[in-house]
Image: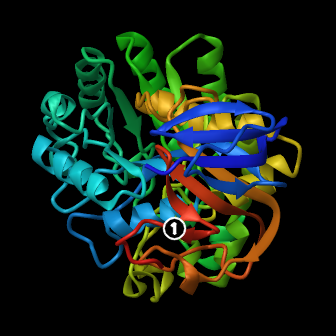
């Protein structure tokens, strides 16, 4: 393995130092480190060194929808976005509700090599919400699943949700809930409010999210397990989670980059690229989730990267599939909405996009602080760069980015997975893997 000496980087946005990577570890951090024989030297002047990012909510689509994404293309996009680990959601075909399917996804990630892939197992068989899936078998599998979600479908049955929380408690697992009361969102197309009435689109009310979050927090308090709230999107949801944390309950929550930046007003274009679940909300909701992320009520940023082929988005709004891609733009969006607005420091960003998601997902060799002896999962980022988002330039197989044409700050210059560069000079770097 080739050693790499990174010189002059701002470590997590702080002091300037050199970082030596060798044998999969950070060997040393300090000033004026000598260059070992055979090492490659990278001038990181002006760059920020971050721990490799961790995404707790990614849709890789394989198996079953390889026309939208594969593990290879999705993890390549992740590496270009600065990620070294992603958690793959269970809504594949077949559903990841057995040990066999989660092990298949896990092995595909190892073969691709761009980022470690940790499968999320379904809570219920087929994500149908009627019978618990093989939670124990998935936990004991080679994939060592610790997070379970029917994402895309809410576990709406309270008794079944209670049993799931009780079951995973035995091995310290987490239930990640897609909070959507289905009876309040039948036919929903966008956020419910004055604008949905003007546009003639069926509304998705905030209470449909908030009522499930409140119920599940009460269930979790009764059971004493671990609950994670997926893609929280409303001011009311932030307040509910904040109250739960004040009570000391074991509840965590995530927000997506798009919910930190975009509002329901974009639906007025009727462009299905802005259709997502949960929907884009109001400006007040955006301000509330930003505040919640800043004060730690919301634990992490998760992309909810949801690729779709052209035919699933290039159609009328009502027929379009909900979802947006986001792995390659997440870091830039968080810089723009949170760091450049002084709501988060770079150290805070590392916490929300690396340390905490790794802790929630229970992966020990990711989300480590940049120090000697830690795994060499490192991202070099240029915060002063600017780029205009062009869908055709994404490494994902899909093009459904809501940020098309926007000029965003920052650029991932290099990503290292256990000391091996997956991205160098902003381009994918693994030998034998096709570049974008």
- Give the vertical position of 370 relative to 314 (above or below): above
Instruction: Give the residue number, with chain letter if any, for mark 1.
Output: 325
Q: Is residue 156 left or right of residue 203?
A: left
- Colour scheme employed for the rendering of this structure: rainbow
Q: Is residue 96 left or right of residue 86?
A: left
Q: Residue at x 58, y 38 (%)?
A: 354
Which is nearer the eye, 278 or 380?
380
Percent across and percent down for residue 198 are 68, 75
Residue lying farthest front?
37
- Within 10 Å of disc 1 (Cα), the crowding (few <14, some 14-19, many 20+) is many
Q: Residue at x 33, y 41 (%)?
A: 149
Q: Residue at x 72, y 70 (%)?
A: 265
Q: Considering the numbered disc 1 on the image, is that residue within a helix, a strand or a loop?
A: loop
Which quarter of the figure has residue 242? top right
Percent across and percent down for residue 358 are 49, 33
Which quarter of the figure has residue 312? bottom left
Q: Is residue 284 visible?
A: no
- Give the vertical position of 319 relative to 89 (above or below): below
- Give the vertical position of 301 relative to 329 (above or below): above
Q: Is residue 99 left or right of residue 233?
A: left
Q: Is residue 274 visible?
A: yes
Q: Is residue 412 left or right of residue 428?
A: right
Which is nearer the eye, 87 or 364?
364
Percent across and percent down for residue 102 are 20, 46
């Amino acid at each position: 393995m080739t050693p790499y000496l990174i010189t002059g980087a701002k470590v997590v946005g702080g002091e300037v130092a050199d970082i030596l990577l060798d044998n999969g570890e950070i060997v040393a951090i300090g000033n004026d480190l000598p260059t070992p024989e055979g090492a490659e030297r990278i001038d990181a002047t002006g760059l920020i060194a971050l721990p490799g990012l961790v995404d707790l909510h990614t849709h890789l689509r394989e198996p079953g929808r390889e026309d939208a994404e594969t593990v290879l293309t999705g993890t390549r996009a992740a590496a270009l976005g600065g990620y070294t680990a992603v958690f793959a959601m269970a809504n594949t075909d077949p559903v990841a509700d057995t040990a066999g399917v989660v092990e298949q996804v896990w092995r595909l990630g190892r073969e691709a090599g761009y980022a470690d892939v940790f499968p999320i197992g379904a809570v219920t068989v087929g994500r149908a919400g009627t019978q618990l899936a093989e939670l124990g078998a998935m936990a004991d599998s080679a994939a060592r699943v610790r997070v379970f979600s029917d994402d895309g479908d809410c576990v709406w049955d309270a008794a079944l949700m209670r049993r799931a929380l009780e079951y995973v408690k035995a091995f310290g697992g987490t239930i990640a809930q897609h909070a959507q009361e289905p009876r309040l969102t039948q036919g929903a197309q966008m956020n419910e409010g004055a604008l949905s009435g003007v546009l003639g689109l069926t509304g998705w009310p905030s209470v449909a999210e908030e009522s499930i979050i409140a119920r599940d927090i009460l269930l979790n308090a009764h059971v004493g397990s671990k609950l994670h709230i997926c893609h929280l999107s409303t001011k009311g949801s932030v307040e509910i989670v904040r109250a739960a944390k004040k009570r000391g309950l074991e509840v965590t929550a995530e927000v997506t980059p798009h919910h930190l930046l975009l509002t329901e007003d974009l639906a007025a274009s009727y462009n299905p690229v802005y259709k997502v679940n949960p929907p884009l909300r109001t400006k007040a909701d955006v301000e509330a989730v930003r505040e919640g992320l800043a004060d730690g009520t919301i634990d992490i940023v998760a992309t909810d990267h949801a690729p779709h082929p052209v035919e699933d988005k290039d159609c009328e709004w009502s027929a379009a599939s909900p979802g947006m891609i986001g792995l390659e733009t997440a870091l830039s969006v968080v810089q723009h909405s949170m760091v450049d607005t002084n709501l988060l420091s770079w150290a805070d960003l590392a916490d929300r996009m690396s340390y905490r998601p790794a802790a929630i997902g229970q992966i020990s060799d990711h989300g480590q602080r940049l120090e000697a002896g830690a795994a060499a999962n490192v991202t070099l980022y240029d915060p002063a760069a600017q780029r205009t988002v062009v869908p055709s330039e994404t490494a994902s197989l899909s093009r459904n980015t809501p940020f098309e044409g926007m000029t965003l700050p920052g650029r991932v210059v290099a990503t290292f997975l256990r000391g091996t560069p997956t991205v160098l000079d902003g381009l994918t770097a693994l030998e034998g893997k096709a570049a974008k």
